[in-house]
Image (tube, coloured by chain):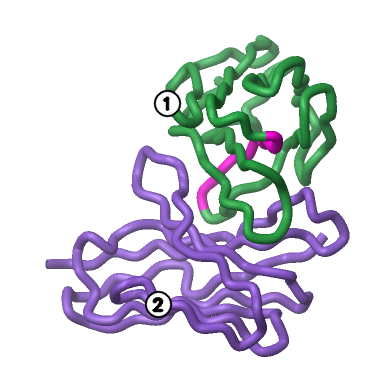
Chain colours: A green, B purple
């Protein structure tokens, strides 16, 4: 199993550009989520999904869109990139949600917006 | 939204020393998890604590969940350079069990 994969690993965007960060998992996990990690702030939840066709907002959803058309894929779209979106983005998945569920994280995408 | 505060934010110690990292909240959590993250990688789960007062051991790492389920600690005995990394606590929001909330992390450096 590849686990959770993310592409690209690095990306530089200009302000106003749009792009999609890809995330895929091959563990048949129902729950998937996107986090951003900034220095001194841990991981903050952007969006999450409890199954195909179901998504919801996390703590910091503004400027990001998600969709979940299949169990395996959970792409994150930046609509119009801003310097404040410079961060490291992690995708995670788990068998289910709530008590005792282990989150499996991808290797991250380092995004810089100039 | 519930908050998790970790202390200290940064810790630099000599190999062989002991240390404790704290994760505190004013809210009750149904469970807390501890993750370790190494540079350039995603976090990896170390342990989940569920019951108030629970103590779990993972080799030289001891995890404790507070009796009131509002706090947790991670104690490392005889730290080694391989313990270097970012330690994160996390818990599911009681208002929405779908949202996993992370603390800001403790960055540990163990010098040889």
Residue B44 on image: x %, y %: 44, 50
Label 2 chain ID: B
Residue labelled with disc 1: A2
Give how far across and how far down residue B79 sits, in percent. 24, 74
The answer to whether residue A95 is magenta is no
Q: Residue B19 at what x, y percent from top left?
A: 34, 81
Q: What element carries label 1?
A: loop
Position of A89 relative to B60 (above/below): above
Q: Quadrant of the N terminus of chain A?
A: top left
Question: What residue appears at the point 28 percent right and 63 percent down from the top-left corner?
Answer: B83
Name the residue located 72 percent from the left edge and 65 percent from the top edge. Answer: B3
Is A13 situated above or below A42?
above
The magenta span reads A30-39
Instruction: Please give the residue where the numbered disc 2 appears in the rendered image.
Output: B57
- B29 and B22: which one is in front? B29
Q: Quadrant of the C terminus of chain A?
A: top right
Alpha carbon of mark 1 to alpha carbon of mark 2: how far? 29 Å
Q: Is residue A59 left or right of residue B59?
A: right
Residue A34 belongs to the span the image colors magenta: yes
Residue B47: x %, y % from top left: 49, 65
């Amino acid at each position: 199993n590849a686990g959770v994969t993310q592409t690209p690993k690095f990306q530089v965007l200009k302000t106003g550009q749009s792009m999609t960060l890809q995330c895929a998992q091959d563990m048949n996990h129902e729950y998937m989520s996107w986090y951003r990690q900034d220095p001194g702030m841990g991981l903050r939840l952007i969006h999450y999904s409890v199954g195909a066709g179901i998504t919801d907002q996390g703590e910091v959803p503004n400027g990001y869109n998600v969709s979940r058309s299949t169990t395996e894929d959970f792409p994150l779209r930046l609509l119009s990139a801003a310097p404040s979106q410079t961060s490291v983005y992690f995708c995670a998945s788990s068998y289910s949600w709530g008590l005792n569920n282990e989150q499996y994280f991808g290797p991250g995408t380092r995004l810089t917006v100039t | 939204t519930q908050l998790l505060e970790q202390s200290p934010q940064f810790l630099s110690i000599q190999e062989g020393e002991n240390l404790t990292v704290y994760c505190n909240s004013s809210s009750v959590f149904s469970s807390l998890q501890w993750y370790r993250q190494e540079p350039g990688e995603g976090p990896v789960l170390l342990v989940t604590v569920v019951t108030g007062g629970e103590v779990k051991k993972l080799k030289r790492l001891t995890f404790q969940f507070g009796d009131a389920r509002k706090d947790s600690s991670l104690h490392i005995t005889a730290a080694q350079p391989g313990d270097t990394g970012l330690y994160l606590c996390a818990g599911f929001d009681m208002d929405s069990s779908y949202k996993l909330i992370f603390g800001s992390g403790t960055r540990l450096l163990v010098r040889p």
